[in-house]
Image (cartoon, helix red, strand yellow):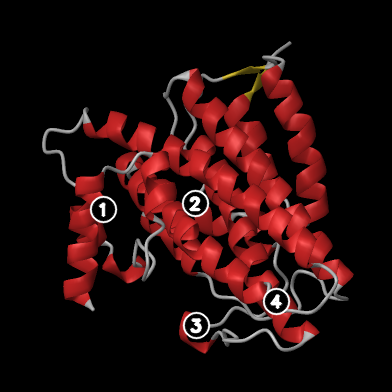
C-alpha cells in the first residue's frame, strides 16, 4: 500500500537530530525512488517556524553582524570556525530543499525528484564537513551561527516563484561565489587535512552548480505562468536584505548553472551601484 508523500515528509521536517534525520531520509528516499508514495494531498502545510529541524543546530543563534569571520587561518580553532559556518549553510540547505518539496503541492513528479536529490546531496555535504570538524576535535554546534537562511525560508514560504528565485537560484548561487574564496583561505592551514579539504569543496561546488541549475529551470518555468514576469535583478532589489550575490561572482559556475552573460552584467551593475 502506498504512503502519503507530504505527511511523511512533514515527519522528516520535525526531526531534531541530524543523525536521525540522515537515517530517516535515506529510508524515505529509497521508498520514494521505489514509487511507494502518492502525491495527492488536500492538507495545509505546516508553518515553517514549527519544524523540529530548526533545532538541528544546538549552537547559540546570533545576528549575522555578530558572527566573527576569521580573515586568516592561523590555528585549528579558526579552521574549525570556518568549516562550521559552511556546515551550518549545508545543514540549512537540507531544510530548504525538503521544505520546497513539502510546501509546494501539485507540481510534476520531476519537481519532487529534483528537490529530494538536492536534499540528498546537501546531507552528504553536511556529513563530509562534520567529518572534517571531527578530525579537528570539534562538532557541529560548537560555534555561534546566524539564522538568515531560516529567515529566507519564512520570507519565501507563500510563493513558489519567489522561493525558487531567492533561495535556489539566488542564495545557492551565492554559495558558488563563496566556494573558491573560502577554500583558498582554508588552504592556508598547515594541518594535514588540506587534500581532504580541497576534495570536499570540489564535491560541493560541482553539486551546487547542479542545484542552482535546478533552481534556474523551475524558476523560469514558474515565470511563464505569471501574468507579469519579472527579472532576477528585480528579485535582487526586492530582497536586497539577503544580498543574492557574492562580492565577486563566480562567472564560470553561474554560466554553467543557467545564468546568462547579459543577466550577470546586469547584476554586477546593480550590486556595484548599491555598494
Q: How many marks?
A: 4
Residue positioned 76% across, 85% down in the render: 77
Report which residue position mark 4 lands on.
Answer: 59
Mark 4 or mark 2: name the one nearer the start of the chain.
Answer: 2
Q: Residue furthest left?
A: 228
Report which residue position mark 2 lands on.
Answer: 47
Mark 3 or mark 1: name the one nearer the start of the chain.
Answer: 3
Which is closer to the viewer, label 4 or label 2? 4
- Could you tell me if residue 45 is visible in this image? no
Report which residue position mark 3 lands on.
Answer: 63
Number of other residues with Cα within 10 Å of mark 3, as a class: few under 14, some 14 to 19, many 20 or more = few
Residue positioned 36% across, 62% down in the render: 245
Report which residue position mark 1 lands on.
Answer: 264
Quadrant in the rendering for residue 199:
bottom right
Mark 1 or mark 2: name the one nearer the start of the chain.
Answer: 2
Which is closer to the viewer, label 2 or label 3? 3
Which is closer to the viewer, label 3 or label 1? 1
In the rendered view, would you say 256 is above or below 18? above
Amino acid at each position: 500500500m502506498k504512503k502519503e508523500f507530504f505527511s511523511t515528509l512533514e515527519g522528516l521536517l520535525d526531526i531534531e537530530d541530524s543523525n536521525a534525520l540522515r537515517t530517516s531520509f535515506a529510508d524515505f528516499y529509497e521508498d520514494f525512488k521505489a514509487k511507494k508514495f502518492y502525491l495527492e494531498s488536500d492538507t495545509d502545510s505546516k508553518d515553517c517556524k514549527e519544524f523540529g529541524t530548526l533545532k538541528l543546530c544546538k549552537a547559540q543563534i546570533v545576528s549575522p553582524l555578530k558572527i566573527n569571520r576569521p580573515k586568516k587561518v592561523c590555528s585549528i580553532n579558526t579552521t574549525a570556525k570556518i568549516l562550521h559556518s559552511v556546515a551550518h549553510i549545508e545543514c540549512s540547505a537540507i531544510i530548504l530543499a525538503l521544505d520546497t518539496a513539502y510546501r509546494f503541492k501539485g507540481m510534476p513528479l520531476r519537481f519532487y525528484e529534483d528537490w529530494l536529490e538536492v536534499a540528498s546531496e546537501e546531507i552528504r555535504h553536511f556529513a563530509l564537513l562534520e567529518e572534517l570538524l571531527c578530525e579537528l576535535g570539534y562538532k557541529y554546534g560548537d560555534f555561534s551561527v546566524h539564522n538568515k537562511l531560516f529567515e529566507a525560508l519564512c520570507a519565501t514560504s507563500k510563493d513558489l516563484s519567489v522561493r525558487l528565485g531567492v533561495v535556489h537560484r539566488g542564495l545557492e548561487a551565492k554559495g558558488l561565489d563563496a566556494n573558491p574564496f573560502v577554500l583558498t583561505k582554508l588552504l592556508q592551514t598547515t594541518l594535514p587535512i588540506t587534500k581532504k579539504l580541497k576534495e570536499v569543496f570540489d564535491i560541493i561546488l560541482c553539486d551546487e552548480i547542479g542545484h542552482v541549475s535546478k533552481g534556474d529551470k523551475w524558476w523560469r518555468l514558474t515565470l511563464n505562468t505569471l501574468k507579469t514576469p519579472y527579472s532576477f535583478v528585480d528579485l535582487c532589489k526586492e530582497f536586497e536584505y539577503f544580498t543574492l550575490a557574492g562580492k565577486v561572482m563566480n562567472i564560470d559556475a553561474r554560466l554553467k548553472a543557467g545564468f546568462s552573460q547579459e543577466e550577470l552584467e546586469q547584476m554586477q551593475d546593480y550590486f556595484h551601484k548599491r555598494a
